[in-house]
């Protein structure tokens, strides 16, 4: 997904150093919370354990790109079987639906959070 002006915002963040990194991390966490909320809303309920296991990771850097991961923790290990299905169970892609429902809001939250952090 591409947001107009995001390259310029990221360039501004790099010039700020540590403060920019903190702003970027906070923006990613806020967006992760939005995606988490949407995934929780889409998660099927049997015991409620899967819904309760959805978490947002700390900010990580992979391949030079900062990111957060949203999904079930170790208590919700079986979430992958629900998402993708098994030989005996039809797939219920609750995580994909949750992501698709929230990605626009998450991207606009990142943009707004970065702009607010930069005072723009």
Image (tube, rainbow, N blue to C red):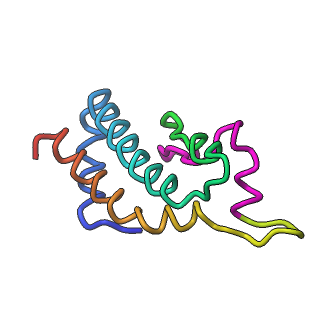
Within the magenta stretch, is there residue 30? no
Count the marks.
0
At 21% from the left and 51% from the top, the residue drawn is 112
Query: Taking 10 as reference, is 23 above or below it?
Result: above
**Closest to the observer, 50 or 5:** 50
Tell which residue pokes out farthest to the right in this image: 87
At 50% from the left and 33% from the top, the residue drawn is 58
**Closest to the observer, 11 or 100:** 100
The quarter holding residue 7 reads: bottom left
**Closest to the observer, 50 or 27:** 50
Q: Where is residue 109 in the image (x, y as percent from the top left)?
A: 28, 53
The quarter holding residue 82 reads: bottom right
Q: Tell me which segment is drawn in magenta.
A: 61-83
Query: Taking 106 as reference, is 96 above or below it?
Result: below
Q: Where is residue 8 in the image (x, y as percent from the top left)?
A: 24, 55
Query: Taking 80 as reference, is 96 above or below it?
Result: below
User: In the image, is 28 to the left or to the right of 59?
Assistant: left
């Amino acid at each position: 997904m591409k947001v107009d002006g995001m390259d310029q915002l990221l360039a501004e963040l790099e010039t700020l150093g540590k403060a920019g990194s903190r702003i970027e991390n906070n923006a990613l966490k806020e967006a992760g919370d939005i995606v988490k909320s949407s995934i929780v809303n889409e998660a099927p309920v049997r015991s409620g354990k899967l819904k309760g296991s959805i978490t947002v990771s700390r900010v990580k850097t992979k391949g030079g790109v900062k990111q957060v991961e949203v999904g079930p923790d170790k208590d919700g290990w079986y979430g992958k079987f629900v998402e993708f299905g098994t030989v005996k169970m039809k797939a219920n892609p609750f995580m994909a639906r949750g992501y698709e429902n929230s990605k626009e809001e998450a991207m606009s939250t990142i943009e707004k959070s970065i702009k607010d952090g930069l005072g723009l």
